[in-house]
Amino acid sequence: MAAAPRQTSGNAIASFVLGLTAILCTAGVTGIPGLICGFIALSAIKKHPAQLTGRGFAITGLITSALGLALLALILAAAYNARPKPFAVAAPAYTTLIGEDYNGRGFHFTVNGRTYIGCSLHQFDNARPSVMLHDDFTDPVAITGQAHTQTDIQILDFQSDELDRLPPLTYTPNPSIRTGDPVFLIDDSTPIRGHIVRQDVLDDQWIFEPDNGATFEAQARSGSPIVSGLTGDVIGVFLTADDADHATWGGFEPISMP
C-alpha cells in the first residue's frame, strides 16, 4: 500500500504569511504570532518528517517575523523619542536686532569666546548688510565682515560699543536637535513657545509648531533666533512659515559653526 503524501504544515504556511504581513502591512504587529507558528511548525516537522513538510516556509516565516518585530521596535523607539518634551528653562530676556532698511531681524551670540551676529541671507538678497539696528541704540551696529555662511544663514562680525554692553545669547557647537524638543522663537514681543514636529531635509530646516494650537505673526521675523527650551542656547535662525499673519508652523535652519 502506497504511503500517504506528505502535507505542508499549516503552521509553516501561517508563519510565512504572518511574517510577510509583519514587514509589508502591519509594521511588525503580526511578528509574534509568526514566530510562534514558525517554531511550532519546525517542531512538528522534526517529529513527523514522513507526514509533514514546509520547513522552508517556517524558516522564512521566522526570519520575516523577527525582522517585523525589529521594525516595530524601531517605530516605537522613534515615537518615544519624538514625544513632546517639557521645557526645562525659561526663555532668555532678549531684544532682537533689526535688519538694515528694516528687513527682518538678527541677534548676537557668543561661541568659543567670540561674539557674532546671526541673521538670514535672503532678507538681504543674499548679501552682507552694512549695518544692523536696535531700538535702544543711538548708532547703528556696523557690520565689518562675514564670518560664516550656510544655506540661508550668515554669521557676521561687527563693531558696536552699545551692542557689546548688551548680554548676548549663547551657542554651543553641534547642538542636539530632535523631533519633540521644545523651542522658543525670540523677538521683541512675548517669546513664542513651541515644539519641533519634523525635519525638512530638502530645505535643511526643522519645523516647529506653537503649543496649544496657537498661531503667530511671522511677518518681518525672519532672522530671529530659535532658542532651545532644554538648554537655553540659541540653536538656529527662523526663516519661514506657512502664513505671514497667522502662522501655524515655522521653519528654522540650525546654526552649524565650524
Image (cartoon, grey):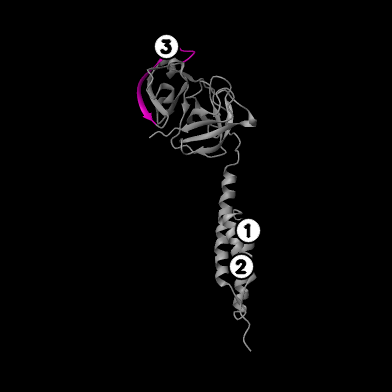
Q: Is residue 25 above or below residue 205?
A: below
Kind of residue sitting beneath label 1 = Thr
Kind of residue sitting beneath label 2 = Ile
* Along the line of sight, the residue nearer the viewer: 93 or 241: 241
Label 3 sits on residue: 139
Any part of residue 69 in sight: no
Residue 30: mark in rendering: 1
Q: Label 3: few (<14), some or many (≥20) within 10 Å?
A: some
Q: Farthest residue toward the top?
A: 138
Label 2 sits on residue: 13
Q: Label 1: few (<14), some or many (≥20) within 10 Å?
A: many
**Element at label 2:** helix
Residue 23: name its quadrant: bottom right
Q: Farthest residue toward the front?
A: 2
Q: Name the residue located 59 percent from the left edge and 45 percent from the top edge.
A: 79
- Looking at the figure, which quarter contains the N terminus? bottom right
User: What's the magenta region?
Assistant: 134-149
Kind of residue sitting beneath label 3 = Asp
Whole-angstrom CA distance, mark 2 to mark 1, is 14 Å
- Are the residues flagged by discs 1 and 3 in contact, CB closer than 8 Å? no
Residue 71 location (% of width, % of height):
56, 54
In this rendering, would 21 be left or right of 141? right
Q: Label 2: few (<14), some or many (≥20) within 10 Å?
A: many
Residue 139 belongs to the span the image colors magenta: yes
- Looking at the figure, which quarter contains the C terminus? top left
